[in-house]
């Protein structure tokens, strides 16, 4: 008697086939998610440990690294310190990012306004596919076109080699344009319809409505779009490397050959020995790149939090 | 001060101009790529191996490598992204763990691809001693692809109505069974569209591959399909320069006499392939949707 109750209990408490499958599915899908998180942690951990070696193993001071103007990690200067001043590359990266964002923003927001406010029909039929195609063109193709069209044009107009920040800006402008445009469209789309109707009912013209109501209401979203574009520009490697001239010097003018963090990384990593100072210094540049992309992420978050208040 | 009506006209005229200019930029880009690239294309160009110092090489090996890497990367990343998206959308509760995970995915998607490539170099090429190989490259591409694919699959799951889930649960199916039997079949068309679009991005990626799959393309013997032989096309341990890397490589080294013609041709192939991916995604998505939903 006792035994059969136990059996019955066991039978009732046992997981059914479906329940087992459920647990299995949950565990498998959760582990996929954890794997992605592990990859992120791994990337940050590995790059940080390599990038910090310059400061902890090779005892380069952080200030020298961030403010030094000459980059030549294999050579030591008059004081016997290695020349690992990353300022030219950091300057190059920031200049090219800010400039391309300044050029791209009016075009992107203008196009987005056109698509969403003025001619939604043409927007959906022509401009939507155009931005999608522009996003799809690989960065090396942009770099190649930059090399064969933009660089000779700059050379013809401004003299010099044609390589430099100006050419890089031209290429990046076209590269980030579709990203900023499509995110701006999303931002404009999120503005409620009755904002526009209220403004038009008050007798405002279409442009007044766009300028004074829609753009103001969409500002946080538009800023997010621009920051995303800047993040993309900051991290772009090959297209920039192909047109910037790759001279690790302080950029004297926009048409002098210079370099960015990404361009030095792509050309340098393969030519240095793992564990050497030259190599560690490059990993420090990669770390700067990584930290900057985290900063861009943070800015987007902050804008999002502020924008949500209304 | 202009009167508001004239101002309105001027402003809207300007916006027309801006939008027109953007369309012109795309047309100029596509026009340049196709006009300079299409004349280079020939059967010889698409199949012959590259020549380092002589004219008249092709991109056969690179083209094959691009597709092989794409397929491997998709095979690895799709199941992971699918699992992650299912958990995020169907199981995850709205708490700090989920928020942290979402933040991590966002960070991964915003990392520059060159950083992902460098990590791949450090971890797979150096630490795990895989060397410059297809496998290292496929893993790097997987990392590059995962956040985007996860997001796009999650968006696809979001388009499926809640009533479908409630229906499945009300019939006594478990959550997992509801997902695999009801939700996924309904989401297949839009998942497929997302997969093809991400394939286009992976196909053109180069920065993540330079230091993982390598910059050399050893000759392949297309009659040898034993994956353990070094010249076999299937060998995952050989270095494999892809088409995108090839364009970068020959332009930054400049020892190939017809580098410009080869890059024009390769660019045209890349862009045509991506256009094809785009159209295929739209067409197949619509077609499948019609078939599966009898709409």
Image: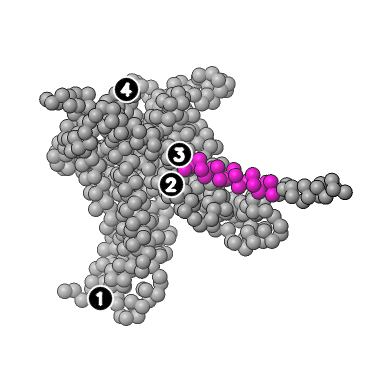
User: With B36 as the anchor, is A93 left or right in this view?
Assistant: left
Residue lying furthest front in this view?
A2
Query: Which residue: 46% across, 26% down?
Result: B128
Residue A234 placement: quadrant:
top left
A154 lies above or below B210: below
Residue furthest to the right: A1
Image coords of residue B21 (percent x, y): 30, 55
Residue at figure coordinates x 36%, y 66% from the top left? A309
Task: Please say whether residue A24 is one of the residues in the magenta stretch.
Answer: yes
Q: For residue A71, which quarter of the picture? A: top left
- Dot placed on the residue nearer the N-terminal end, 3 or 4: 3
* Left or right of B130, for residue B53: left
Query: Which residue position holds label 2?
Result: B104
> Disc 1 and disc 3: Cα gap in Å?
56 Å
Magenta region: A19-37
> How far across and down, in percent of the image, does residue B98 sit?
49, 52
Question: Residue A169 location in percent, x, y?
Answer: 24, 45
Q: Nearer the viewer, mark 2 or mark 4?
A: 2
The residue that mark 4 highlights is: A273
Q: Which residue is mark 1?
A: B5
């Amino acid at each position: 008697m006792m035994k059969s109750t136990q059996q019955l209990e066991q039978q009732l408490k046992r997981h059914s086939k479906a329940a087992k499958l459920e647990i299995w599915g949950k565990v498998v899908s959760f582990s996929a998610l954890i794997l992605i998180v592990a990859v992120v942690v791994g990337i940050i951990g590995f790059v940080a440990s390599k990038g910090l070696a310059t400061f902890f193993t090779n005892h380069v001071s952080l200030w020298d690294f961030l403010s030094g103007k000459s980059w030549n990690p294999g050579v030591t200067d008059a004081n016997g310190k290695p020349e690992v001043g990353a300022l030219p590359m950091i300057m190059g990266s920031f200049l090219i990012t800010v400039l391309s964002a300044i050029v791209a923003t009016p075009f992107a927001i203008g196009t987005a306004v056109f698509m969403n406010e003025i001619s939604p029909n043409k927007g959906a039929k022509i401009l939507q596919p155009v931005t999608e195609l522009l996003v799809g063109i690989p960065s090396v193709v942009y770099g190649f076109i930059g090399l064969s069209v933009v660089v000779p044009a700059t050379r013809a107009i401004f003299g010099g080699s044609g390589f430099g920040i100006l050419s890089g800006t031209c290429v990046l402008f076209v590269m980030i344009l579709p990203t900023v445009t499509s995110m701006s469209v999303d931002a404009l789309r999120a503005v409620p319809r009755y904002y526009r109707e209220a403004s038009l009912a008050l007798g405002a013209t279409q442009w007044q409505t766009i300028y004074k109501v829609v753009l103001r209401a969409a500002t946080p979203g538009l800023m997010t779009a621009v920051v995303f574009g800047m993040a993309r520009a900051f991290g772009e490697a090959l297209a920039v490397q192909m047109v910037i001239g790759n001279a690790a010097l302080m950029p004297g003018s926009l048409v002098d050959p210079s370099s960015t963090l990404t361009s030095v990384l792509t050309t340098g990593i393969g030519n240095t020995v793992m564990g050497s100072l030259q190599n560690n210094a490059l990993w420090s540049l990669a770390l700067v790149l990584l930290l900057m992309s985290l900063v861009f992420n943070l800015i987007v978050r902050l804008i999002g939090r502020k924008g949500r208040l209304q | 001060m202009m009167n508001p009506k004239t101002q309105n006209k001027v402003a809207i005229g300007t916006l027309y101009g801006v939008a027109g200019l953007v369309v012109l930029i795309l047309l100029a880009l596509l026009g340049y790529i196709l006009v300079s690239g299409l004349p280079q294309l020939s059967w010889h160009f698409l199949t012959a191996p590259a020549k380092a110092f002589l004219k008249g090489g092709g991109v056969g090996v690179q083209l094959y490598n691009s597709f092989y890497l794409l397929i491997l990367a998709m095979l690895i990343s799709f199941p992971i992204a699918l699992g992650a998206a299912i958990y995020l959308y169907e199981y995850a509760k709205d708490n700090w763990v989920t928020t942290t995970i979402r933040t991590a995915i966002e960070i991964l998607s915003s990392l520059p691809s060159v950083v992902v490539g460098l990590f791949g170099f450090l971890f797979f090429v150096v630490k795990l001693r895989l060397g410059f190989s297809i496998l290292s490259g496929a893993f790097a591409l997987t990392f590059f692809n995962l956040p985007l694919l996860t997001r796009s699959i999650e968006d696809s799951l979001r388009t499926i109505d809640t009533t479908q889930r409630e229906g499945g649960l009300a019939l006594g199916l478990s959550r997992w069974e509801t997902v695999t039997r009801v939700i996924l079949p309904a989401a297949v068309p839009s998942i497929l569209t997302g997969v093809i679009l991400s394939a286009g991005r992976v196909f053109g990626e180069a920065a993540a591959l330079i230091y993982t799959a390598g910059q050399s393309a050893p000759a392949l013997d297309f009659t040898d399909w034993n994956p353990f032989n070094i010249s076999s096309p299937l060998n995952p341990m050989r270095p494999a320069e892809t088409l995108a890397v090839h364009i970068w490589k020959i332009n930054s080294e400049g020892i190939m006499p017809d580098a410009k013609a080869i890059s024009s041709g390769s660019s045209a192939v890349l862009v045509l392939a991506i256009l094809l991916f785009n159209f295929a995604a739209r067409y197949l998505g619509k077609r499948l949707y019609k078939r599966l939903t009898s709409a």
